[in-house]
Image (tube, grey):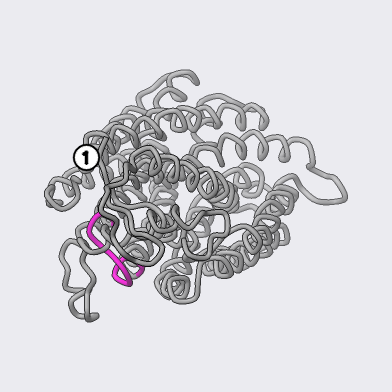
Amino acid sequence: MKSHTALSPDGHVPAVPVQVDDFESRTYAKVARRLIPFLMLCYLGAYLDRVNVGFAKLQMLNDLKWSDTVYGLGAGIFFIGYFIFEVPSNMILHKFGARRWLARIMITWAIISAGFSFVSTPTTFYVLRFLLGVAEAGFAPGVILYITYWFPSTRRAKMMSIFFMAIPLASIVGAPLSGWILGTFSGTHGLQGWQWMFILEAIPSLVLGIAILFYLDDSIGAAKWLTPEEKTLLQRNIADDESEKVSHHSIGAFLGDRRLWLLTAIYFCIVMGQYGITFWLPTIVKNAGVTSMVAVGMLSAIPYMVALIALPFVGKSSDRTKARRLHCAVPMLVAAAALFALPFSGGVATAIALLSLAAAGAISATSQFWALPTAFLGGMAAAAGIATINCIANLAGFFSPSIVGWLNDVTGKQGAGLMFTSAALLAGVVLVSFVPGKIVNR
């Protein structure tokens, strides 16, 4: 057990060291219990409203007579709005506090998401997807930044892994729910199943957005549920952690940091893989021979269940070994191999097994990636850096469904899009090897 010299209330250093390991572990467990499950619920709502268009596609394209290209462009254009407004959003959050800003984000996107029930033309679809991106911009990087306010680098990979469990959870809950709504509500009060899906699945985000105002605290110091001793410990650890990080003093120095752009390129490849799976998974399952909408929903949840199991193990291993690059690259490699093999698979069982490996790999890589930039960026540089990486890389969310949809239409085979997505992940694996290990492996 290590010892640590704690500060007395009057600021003087006592002569006798205080044993803090047990106290520190209990304190961080308390913080994790208070924040992470709630943040997961919020991100679950965000992710569900972002990707439920993949299920809407199963009915909407036929009802509105749209092609895969129209769908792919609409699914991807979300990320244009996301790209434009993400950095300003994170800067506002860092300056004025997370509580009100995150609440604003969630309430706005819930209203816009429900508005998709009135879509009738490609133009309306594109406009609403763009506005949804604008509304949601800053939420994911804002939460990542918010976690850095509470947890130092040595404890962050595990917290990120737990937080990003919301991605598979959103699909585990959302896939059967979306399939059930599509199959059950079609024709109710003159609305199709996909219209009801957009309306009903927007409600949780609206409720959670309001709840943020009453539940979250902007900082450690503002948390009434912490004792003075716990606040001192948390604030000291964050201060020690920040002292070892880069805090750029000019925009030029920030933009000139090559590591920032290397990490952006890596995350771009990860996002290409993640959304290549997310937006097309229900279609892949349906094309494997599943006809019932409810069955498509149930089977589409299985890959995310596997991802849910994998995430905490990968995060715990990363914090134990400090091999951050390895824990980002290996899951990407697994996902790339699974996607490459999918066009050659036969039957529903094999397709689900490969999709499970792909989902577990891509989502684990997403969670472990954020242990890289947050290991050396601090202060306003962290706010700007996280947002910059996330917003530019999430342009892959525009290119991935758009290119995959175009390739599918041109070739008449979904295998072309899967090969493209696999190649993007492999490129990311190569780029990870260029990240300086001495900076991030701690």
Residue 90 within the segment the image draws in magenta? no
The residue positioned 47% from the left and 43% from the top of the image is 278
From this view, report whether residue 307 is shown above or below residue 75: above
- What residue does disc 1 label? 322
Of 225 and 296, the residue lying toward us: 225
Residue 9 in sight in this render = yes
Quadrant of the rendered image containing residue 264: bottom left
Q: Main secondary structure of the magenta part?
A: helix
Residue 341 in percent (x, y) is at 32, 27
| In this rendering, position of residue 424 left or right of residue 75 | left
| In this rendering, position of residue 325 left or right of residue 287 | left
Of 7 and 333, the residue lying toward us: 7
Residue 164 in sight in this render = no
Quadrant of the rendered image containing residue 381: bottom left
Residue 35 in percent (x, y) is at 52, 50
Q: Residues within 10 Å of mark 1 (few under 14, many from 20)?
A: some
**The magenta stretch spans which residues?**
374-383
- Looking at the rendered image, the quarter that the N terminus falls into is top left
